[in-house]
Image (spheres, coloured by chain):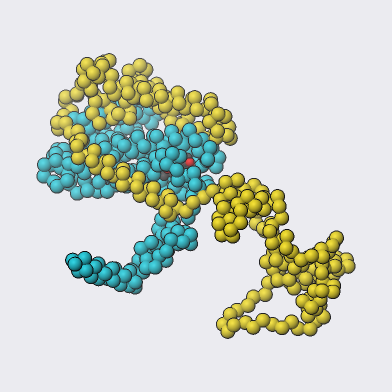
Chain colours: A yellow, B cyan
Amino acid sequence: MAGLPEHLLRRSAEAKAKATGRSVDEILAEMKGETPPAPATAAPTGESGSARDLTKEAADLGVPQDLLRRAMIARAKADGTPLPTEAGAAPAAAAAVAPVAAGSPAPMPAIPEGVRTQRLLTVVKAGSIQQTKREPADKVNTWPHLLAIEFVALLVLSGLLFVFSIYVDAPLLEFANFNQQPNPSKAPWYFLGLQELLSYFDPMVAGIIIPGYGLAALAFIPYLDRNPSVRPSDRKLAIMIFTFFVMGAAILTTYGSFFRGPGFNFTFPWVDGIWFDF
Amino acid sequence: MSGKDKGGVMSKLAETGKHIRSSQAWSSIFRPGSPFRDGYSDTPRNRSYVIMNNVLYHLHPVKVKRHGVRLSYTLCLGGMSFFLFILLTITGIFLMFYYRPTSPQAFLDIQALATDITFGQVVRNMHRWGAHAMVLTVFLHMARVFYHGAYKPPREFNWVVGIMLLLLTLLLSFTGYLLPWDQLAVWAVTVGSNMGRYAPVIGEQVSFALIGGTQITPDTLLRWYVLHVLFLPFIIVIFMAVHFWRVRKDGGISGPL
Ligand code: HEM
């Protein structure tokens, strides 16, 4: 179980401890492989050298013992090697093993009516056929953990918007008149940064080159920034550049919105009032 | 005691409820695992079924990373952009019942919302403030994605899709801005669209096609109305579908940092 995050192991150990009544530390140590699992301490005796303990293996794998034995015999035959001895197979366990070894039929357990049995054709040991790269991650069920949050967010958002809309009316000025340009004339607020630029540079630069290249640069960020790390401390330059441009846009937008009055000249909003509408 | 009578009513109600919930019609609507279904119990299996056996499965996986549901990670900004889009669609449809994109009728219809139509003004307000809020949440969502480095492989392309969504959001807002057909609308749009005219080679042509001439006229109103209520929502929904799909295919939400 190596590679599992510590807190996941601990959580699982705590659950197991609660279920079995043993101590958390004991189970944790066992999970990490620092101590052998508890049942194993009571495992059959008589293990020796190269001998395979089929009883234990069968219990570990959850596979019937006689299948394991059959696989063992088959492998030995294929390799041309002598059969490995079985721990405890010779004298004492003979009774249990004898039926298969001697070829006499084992008493079949009674199969209830209507139950299908399956034969296990092969045993695939741990280490799956498909190599999945997914790392164990700490996950929660979308329901209720995420859906509940989303639902509350939806309610709060709708509520706020509704209450705000009861008290604050959307602007509606006089009927459109193409012969009477208001002074100042301002674009919607999200373009006011650009309009502000337009008062410094010529339209080609402020209206096309800066927003055009800006947008292209924005779209290409993932292909320009080749630094694989997502840790803020590793990306100081990227964060600085982005923050610089975001702050620049925010300042220009604020400036164009609040500090520009008639003739798009500089004003203080607290002196001459606010010259723009949402 | 009056409690007894109440108890009788309550148990009747409970019985009726149980009867409805165990009916064939009810269980044909709520698939196995639905919390509304008869005999629902809060088991891990059912928690999975709530998503898996539900149209929500198109949007959400059964499980999400623990840190991803923390409000402090996404600040719900992408989700809020989407909710706002839904709210804008609902309020927008309401407004469409009362709005004719001709001059001077457009202006008169907006005026009438405040005086002649029940909830007209508050729905208009919600549509307008919701639109401004959406521009803001989309922008902030972009910033949060940047600061998390969530555009790094394998999410590069979803960032580009996001930029398209940002552009489409701005275009939706901008086309909607003209529709009240008042002084604010026509002059803001005049100033805004004059900026685009200087684009090399295609500037004049694009501007001509969008405005339907060399300056804003009632033809522009009809054109922008169609863009605003039909064309742009259609496109943005497609991009959102790709966006959400890619969030999942790129391995869910990024991080933790
Ligand atoms: C209409 C506009 C948009 C909507 C409705 C939207 C919606 C969402 C949602 C619901 C998520 C899931 C996580 C979250 O809530 O933060 C998400 C993730 C993401 N969005 Fe957006 N988004 C929009 C615009 C943008 C923009 C403008 C960008 C960037 C330029 C962007 C880039 C991304 C990226 C890269 C992810 C994956 C983030 C991660 O894995 O942490 N999206 N979006």
| Quarter the C terminus of chain A occupies | top left
**Residue drawn at the location 45% of the way across and 43% of the way down:** B70
Whether residue A151 sits left or right of residue B122 in the image: it is right
Measured as percent of width and height from the top left, residue A230 is found at: 55, 35
In the foreground, B210 or B111:
B111
Q: Nearer the viewer, residue B140 or A202?
A: B140
Does residue B202 appear in this view?
yes
**Residue occupying the point 49% across, 47% down:** B66
Residue depicted at x 43% and y 61%: B42
Give the image quarter of residue B179: top left
Compared to residue A251, the image places residue B129 above or below, namely below
Count of marks placed on residues: 0
Nearer to us in this view, B101 or B141: B141
User: Which residue is at the far left?
Assistant: B116
Q: In this view, does A236 lie to the left or right of B161?
A: right
A278 vs B91: above or below: above
Q: In which quarter of the image is residue A89?
A: bottom right
Image region (quadrant) for ligand 1: top left
The x and y percentages for residue A269 are: 25, 19
Residue at the spot x=43%, y=39% of the render? B72
Q: Position of residue B51 (x, y in %)?
A: 43, 57
Residue B199, given in percent of the width and then of the height, sits at: 38, 27
